[in-house]
Image: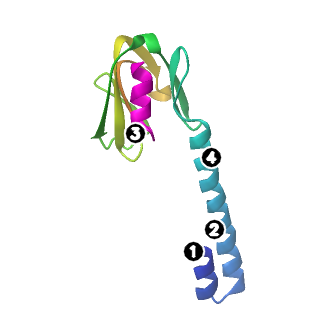
Amino acid sequence: MEILLVDLVVPWFWLRAVLLAFGLLSAGLLAWLLWMLHRFKHEIDDDYLWLRYAREFEYRIPLAAIGTVTQGLTSRSLNKTRSVVDGTLVLEISNSTNVRVDLTEPQDIDLGRRGVHEVTKIEFWTDDPDGMVRALRK
């Protein structure tokens, strides 16, 4: 829609061509990001809870270390995709999380340049919190 509006409003062909190229590039980048988020989503297998965000990070939490699992919306506004706050690994999407996992044994989490932290709780966002909570409680 934006590309069509720009084509109608901008009278110079060269500027329309440049804006069209930028519009197509941004649409391609958005499609790629959405595909990456769909391809590398949180999963549960027989032994682990896999927490992922596109290709940026991947954490493997043993199911044996998972204690209580609760669902509930929280907002911290940390403005980071991943952070550790008071022993809690926070994996926010749009400054909020909707699943909380209390661990029975601490896990070491590597935040790259921000170092390795020991966590006892994890808060993260998932598209299907009911399904995730049910699967983790089994």
Image quadrant occupied by the N terminus: bottom right
Q: How far is the residue under mark 4 from the one under mark 2?
A: 18 Å
36 and 66: which is toward the camera: 66
Residue 49, position as x, y percentages in the image = 49, 22
- Tag 2: amino acid: Gly
Task: Answer with mark 1 or mark 3, whichever residue precedes in sequence.
Answer: 1
**Callout in the foreground (2, 1):** 1
Q: Can residue 10 be found in the magenta stretch?
A: no
Residue under numbered circle 4: 35
Q: How far is the residue under mark 4 from the one under mark 1?
A: 22 Å
- Tag 1: amino acid: Glu
Residue 102, position as x, y percentages in the image = 32, 20
Residue under numbered circle 1: 2
Residue under numbered circle 3: 92
121 and 113: which is toward the camera: 121
- Tag 3: amino acid: Glu
Q: Going by the image, does 6 lie left or right of 66? A: right
Q: Going by the image, does 107 lie left or right of 121? A: right
**Callout in the foreground (4, 3):** 4
Q: How far is the residue under mark 1 from the one under mark 3?
A: 29 Å
Q: Do tag 1 and tag 3 residues touch (Cβ < 8 Å)?
A: no
In this orientation, does residue 125 appear?
A: no
Name the colouring of the figure: rainbow
Which residue is pictured at 40% across the width and 36% down the height? 129
Residue under numbered circle 2: 23
Q: Do tag 2 and tag 1 residues touch (Cβ < 8 Å)?
A: yes
Task: Answer with mark 4 or mark 1, whichever residue precedes in sequence.
Answer: 1
116 and 1: which is toward the camera: 1
Within the image, what quadrant is residue 9 found in?
bottom right
Task: Answer with mark 4 or mark 3, whichever residue precedes in sequence.
Answer: 4
Q: How far is the residue under mark 2 from the one under mark 1?
A: 8 Å
The residue range painted magenta reads 126-138
